Image: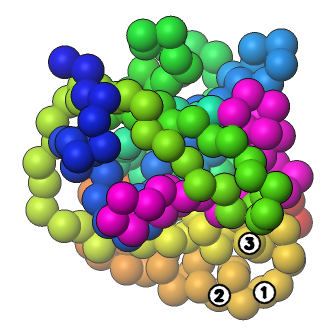
Amino acid sequence: MMICDLEEIEELGIFDGINEIIATTANEVGDPNAAPLGLIKRGDSLSVRLFVGTHTYENIMAKGKFVANVSHDPMLFVETALNDIPEERFIERDGELTLKDAEAWALFKCEPNGLDISLPEVEFVKGEVLKREFRAVNRGINLVVEAAVAATRYVALKSDLYLEEIFKIRRIVGRCGGPREIEAMDRLEELIEQFE
Ligand SMILES: Cc1cc2nc3c(=O)[nH]c(=O)nc-3n(C[C@H](O)[C@H](O)[C@H](O)COP(=O)(O)O)c2cc1C
């Protein structure tokens, strides 16, 4: 069932605060891209903070839209933050570019208003729940997402402080995470080595 009313956006797993989602976008010639993005919700106001120079930024500026894919897969956060994922991981739903494995997806319009192009307001258009996930809080997955943030900063700024953070996180993920979290941390370390 398609959801089109902002009042019902929580049905899609999007709540007040910063929602860490995987944004899918396409460029002018239709090449798909996926990257983690924080979707900021404060009451009825929705916005994103876009780092200039990423594909996500270029594609949103070009097309004026993106899809937020809700996922709890730690590997997806790692792979899309530091790498590209193959085209077969994408699928079109209701005419929009989404991820095959998404738990829910939501389309947002994003018209840069010129005042602050790096912090545009966005408008909810429509979305759909695909799988209803119900799970206890796990420190492991949250920390893999935190490590992916540190890794993107490390790649951009090359400060060893981020590496220390990642090593500290690795120990807790080893204790609290399941096999998928541990595999995702291994992959994260493998990917950042390529940038050293
Ligand atoms: C959990 C998480 C949240 C992120 N949030 C944002 C964000 O809100 N805005 C942004 O521009 N980049 C954000 N990033 C960084 C981008 O995902 C990263 O720069 C990525 O490499 C961009 O890929 P692209 O060039 O394919 O768009 C985030 C990364 C992670 C791991």
Q: Which residues are magenta?
A: 38-64
Q: Is residue 188 visible?
A: no
Instruction: Answer with the quarter of the image where residue 115 lies.
Output: bottom right
Q: Residue at x 74, y 48 (%)?
A: 112
How many marks overall?
Answer: 3
On screen, residue 82 versus residue 123, left or right, reads: right
Instruction: Identify residue type, mark 1.
Output: Asp
Q: CA distance from mark 2 to mark 3?
A: 12 Å
Task: Give percent across and percent down for residue 2.
Answer: 26, 20
On residue 160, the disc is 1
Instruction: Answer with the quarter of the image where residue 51 lies.
Output: bottom right
Task: Give percent across and percent down for residue 88.
Answer: 57, 13
On residue 106, the disc is none
Q: Residue at x 77, y 65 (%)?
A: 116
Q: CA distance from mark 1 to mark 2?
A: 6 Å
Of residues 20 and 95, the one drawn nearer to the viewer in this rendering: 95
Taking the magenta stretch, the answer to whether it contains residue 95 is no
Instruction: Identify residue type, mark 3.
Output: Arg
On screen, residue 155 versus residue 131, left or right, reads: right
Q: CA distance from mark 1 to mark 3?
A: 10 Å
Q: Which residue is mark 3?
A: 153
Q: Secondary structure at mark 1?
A: helix
